[in-house]
Image: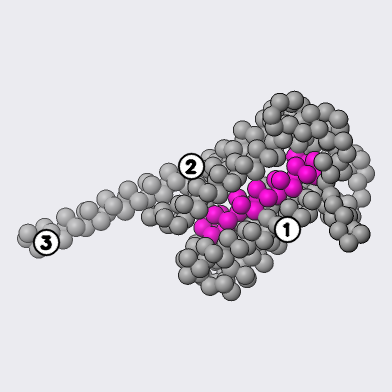
């Protein structure tokens, strides 16, 4: 298997092709969902600029934080650090912050957050397939199905050793998540449920699959990888948010019931 192909005399990496394809399909999906919710295309387009800037900064900063010791020890030039190396969770957090800034700045509701969270897993799945072609984010040594032997790669992937194709497993999980979120978005009765379900489902999948990753350079602390620690924080934060919201809703219902009883009593009914 090759990680690139020749087109018009130029070598084009499949990782880049799959990444671009992921962006395109996510954009088309987001446009479709925006039309369903009657969101303006202009808002989707402008917010995407905020999201991309935030995602780029977040993904790069987390990459530097995780790889800082290796960057210093190996003397990696800053130009190489800037041009390559991104961490998905950093991009996710940075992109979410960019979107929230846009929503707050232009006084919009959180419908855009639903659209992005529903479309994101689809593009992410394409990106993971790209990782498989590039040989990054590789799995543990494993000779069963599904596994793959890399004979050449641009990274630190072990060569000529059967490795678990954990990238493809994650891609499949992301497609399942996307399908479920799409159903919830189109036919669910509760608003703003899509982002919550996305965080809970993806952090769970990512936490489990990290045990089957073989690329130790991503950072392992106290027996867990950086991505697993981030997964725990995001998962617990979402659970706390749901708990706080349910308590507030219960208190609101009690207040409304008290007011109703008071109104009935004052009217002598």
Q: Secondary structure at mark 3?
A: helix
Rendered location of residue 136, percent (x, y): 78, 41
On the image, numbered disc 1 is attached to which residue? 20
The answer to whether residue 225 is seen in the rendering is no
Marks 3 and 1: which is nearer the front?
A: 1
Rendered location of residue 95, percent (x, y): 64, 57
Q: Earlier in the sequence, mark 2 or mark 1?
A: 1
Asked whether, in this view, residue 218 is left or right of residue 158, the answer is left
Q: Is residue 127 magenta?
A: yes
The answer to whether residue 117 is seen in the rendering is yes
Q: Secondary structure at mark 1?
A: helix
Along the viewing direction, whichever of 25 and 55 lies nearer the viewer: 25
Residue 183's disc is none
Q: Which residues fall within the magenta stretch?
A: 113-137
Q: Earlier in the sequence, mark 3 or mark 2?
A: 2
Task: Give the main secondary structure of the magenta stretch.
Answer: helix
> Real-space Cα distance between discs 3 and 2?
41 Å
Q: Earlier in the sequence, mark 3 or mark 1?
A: 1
On the image, numbered disc 2 is attached to which residue? 239
């Amino acid at each position: 298997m090759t990680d690139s192909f020749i087109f018009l005399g130029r070598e084009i990496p499949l990782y880049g092709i799959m990444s671009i394809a992921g962006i395109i399909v996510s954009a088309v999906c987001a446009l479709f969902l925006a039309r369903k919710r009657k969101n303006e295309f202009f808002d989707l387009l402008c917010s995407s600029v905020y999201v991309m800037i935030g995602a780029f900064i977040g993904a790069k900063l987390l990459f530097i934080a995780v790889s800082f010791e290796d960057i210093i020890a190996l003397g990696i030039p800053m130009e190489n650090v800037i041009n390559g190396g991104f961490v998905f969770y950093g991009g996710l957090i940075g992109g979410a912050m960019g979107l929230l800034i846009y929503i707050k700045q232009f006084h919009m509701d959180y419908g855009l957050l639903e659209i992005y969270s529903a479309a994101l897993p689809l593009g992410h799945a394409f990106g993971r397939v790209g990782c498989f072609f590039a040989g990054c984010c590789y799995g543990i040594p494993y000779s069963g199905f599904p596994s793959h032997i890399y004979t050449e790669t641009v990274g630190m992937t072990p060569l000529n050793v059967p490795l678990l194709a954990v990238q493809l497993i994650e891609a499949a999980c992301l497609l399942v998540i996307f399908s479920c979120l799409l159903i919830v978005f189109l036919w669910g009765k509760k608003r703003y449920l899509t982002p919550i379900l996305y965080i809970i489902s993806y952090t769970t999948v990512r936490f489990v699959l990290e045990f089957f990753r073989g690329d130790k350079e991503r950072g392992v602390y106290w027996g867990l990888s950086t991505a697993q620690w981030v997964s725990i924080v995001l998962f617990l934060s979402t659970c706390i948010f749901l708990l706080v919201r349910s308590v507030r809703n219960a208190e609101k219902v009690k207040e409304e019931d008290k007011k109703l009883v008071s109104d009935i009593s004052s009217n002598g009914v």
